[in-house]
Amino acid sequence: MNTIINPALAFSDTEELVVLSREHTANALDFSKLVDAIATAALEYAAGRIQNPERMVVSLGSGGVMLSMPATAHDIGIHKLVNVQPANKARQLPTIHGAVTVCDAETGRLICLLDGPEVTGRRTAAVTLLAIRTLLKETPREILLIGTGVQARYHVQALYALYPQSKIRVRGRSEASSVAFCDRHQLLHDKLAPAAHTISDDVNVVITVTTSTRAVYNEVALCDRLVIGVGAFTPEMAELGKVTLDGSDIFADDPVSARHEAGDLIQAGVDWSCVRSLADGLQGRIDESHPRIFKSIGTGAWDLAAARVALKAIQAEH
């Protein structure tokens, strides 16, 4: 992707397209501002003020997929195009490539091009932060992070940004993978350590960020422990088990898409009429006497929220 060294210089009344590198995209997406922007977008989306069709998935190459996710609001429109090629891991290449195109809603003029994987990673972690702020109602004491991939790294970054005093315990596929992850990312969070075999009573947030096809967390639901499922995004995937799901009130960032994509909920046969939206939580429709699960699916509305944050950052530099 081409890089404009000083993006602010190009953000003017001219029709020049601002292109942000991955580094510039990251710098423009402050986690605290992202959380607030996603909260606003969630309420707009629930009220029908953000148009966000279900993502289109098209096969690409051998075993890959192309994902198309547009969203529009009164101020801007975005289109995120992401290519996922699992075979790239063997090639020592990133498995995800893509970009987010941002346009002015009134004129349709293209304004900005953001790095797709960076937007996805940061806004997904920011949705988790918003779920914690909305559904937990307290600062996390100790967080169990299940998974050691790219999204786990973004979550460590995000958690440090808002909850630097919270302990993070990491559980990978093996003890070795947990230790390796913590060693690689110790500079991102100084309270990062491999998880013990048993879950501490101090753990009041569990976050799953895997691509597992079977449950990696299936404990009895607890009122003082918020469980957040992030990684499973196809009907074949499942991170959260039926024991946990059946004992919890379930919230989803996009309940409509969850019916087709949230494999853990689909396989557990949840009552979809009882699955509430993130907006319901933001509006205070929470029974704090019940355990709570948040299922993160991802939607173009969150990419639109991220684009708003990035545009304000560019304008502030100008």
Image (cartoon, grey):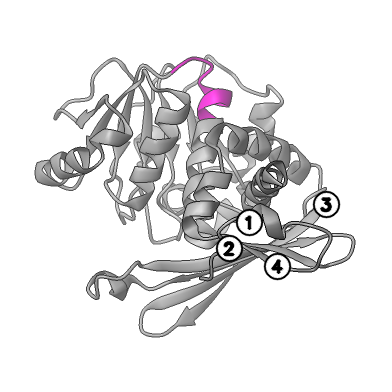
Residue 282 location, quadrant: top right
| Mark 3 and mark 2 residues within 8 Å of each other at the beta carbon | no
Crowding at dot 1, Cα within 10 Å, few <14 / some 14-19 / many 20+, comes out as: many
Residue at image location 36% in from the left, 31% down from the top: 206
Using the numbered discs, state the Cα–Cα distance from disc 2 to disc 4 in whole angstroms: 10 Å
The residue tagged with tag 4: helix, strand or loop? loop
Quickly name the residue at label 3.
Answer: 75
Using the numbered discs, state the Cα–Cα distance from disc 4 to disc 1 in whole angstroms: 10 Å
Residue at image location 59% in from the left, 34% down from the top: 35
**Vertical placement of residue 236 versus 290, above or below:** below
The one nearer the camera, 313 or 76, is: 313
Q: Which residues are magenta?
A: 131-139
Using the numbered discs, state the Cα–Cα distance from disc 3 to disc 1 in whole angstroms: 20 Å
Q: Which residue type does callout 3 highlight?
A: Asp
Identify the disc placed on residue 7. 1
Crowding at dot 4, Cα within 10 Å, few <14 / some 14-19 / many 20+, comes out as: some
Q: Is residue 130 visible?
A: yes
| Mark 2 and mark 4 residues within 8 Å of each other at the beta carbon | no
Q: Point out the residue furthest to the right here.
A: 106
Identify the disc placed on residue 4. 2
The residue tagged with tag 1: helix, strand or loop? helix
Q: Which residue type does callout 2 highlight?
A: Ile
The residue tagged with tag 2: helix, strand or loop? loop
Using the numbered discs, state the Cα–Cα distance from disc 3 to disc 2 in whole angstroms: 24 Å
Residue at image location 24% in from the left, 70% down from the top: 92
* Residue 89 x, y percent position in the rendering: 26, 69
Identify the disc placed on residue 17. 4
